[in-house]
Amino acid sequence: MISKKFIFSLGCVIFLLLTIGAVSASTVDMAGVKFNIPEGYDEFEDASINGAVDEETQFITYCKFYTGGLEDMIIIAVAYPRGDDFKFTLNDVLNESYTRKTINGHEGGFIQQEGNSTFTYVEESKMIIIMSNNESLISHVIV
């Protein structure tokens, strides 16, 4: 007879395998910053911005939009100043609306608005914004 302990252990192994499969991802690079895109998410290329320069602010911006089925979405943006005159810090990009939070070792600001979760952080003077209508996806995207 199979013991309850064995069934419980087998159930835990199956759960872990399903969880690992659910977060398998491909890696993308945007302006030298790597991100994981969960399996089943496709890029909506018409909404991508690849190195656009805002002439007023002199910021260079990259942005990608991913959809997972009909309901889930992920938006990733990276912006940084052209030249070396200005370096982003976390205090430059957060205001009092954000809650300080650390996700996957990155200190940043977290906010929820209109059904979307947004995490903003700074890495090597680049402002990085990850937004999703599914909060749990944010930690899967950050490398």
Image (cartoon, rainbow, N blue to C red):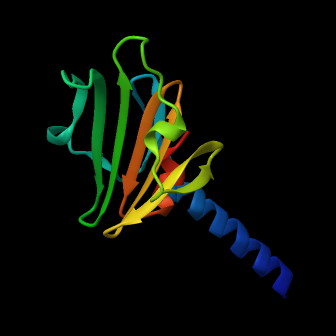
Q: Is the residue 137 above or below the residue 45 in the image?
A: below
The quadrant in which residue 9 appears is: bottom right
Q: Is the residue 2 above or below the residue 131 in the image?
A: below
Q: Residue at x 52, y 40 (%)?
A: 91
Count of numbered marks: 0
Relative horizontal placement of residue 70, taking residue 106 as reference (left or right)? left
x, y percent for residue 119: 47, 51
Relative horizontal placement of residue 129, taking residue 22 as reference (left or right)? left
Q: Residue at x 30, y 24 (%)?
A: 59
Q: Is the residue 17 above or below the residue 88 in the image?
A: below
Q: Which residue is drawn at 38% across and 53% down?
A: 131
Q: Which residue is drawn at 52% across and 32% down?
A: 89
Relative horizontal placement of residue 94, taking residue 63 as reference (left or right)? right
* Res 32 seen here: yes
Q: Nearer the viewer, residue 33 or 83?
A: 83
x, y percent for residue 54: 21, 25
The quadrant of the picture occupied by the N terminus is bottom right
x, y percent for residue 25: 47, 45
* Res 2 seen here: no
The quadrant in which residue 47 appears is: top left
Relative horizontal placement of residue 21, taking residue 111 as reference (left or right)? right
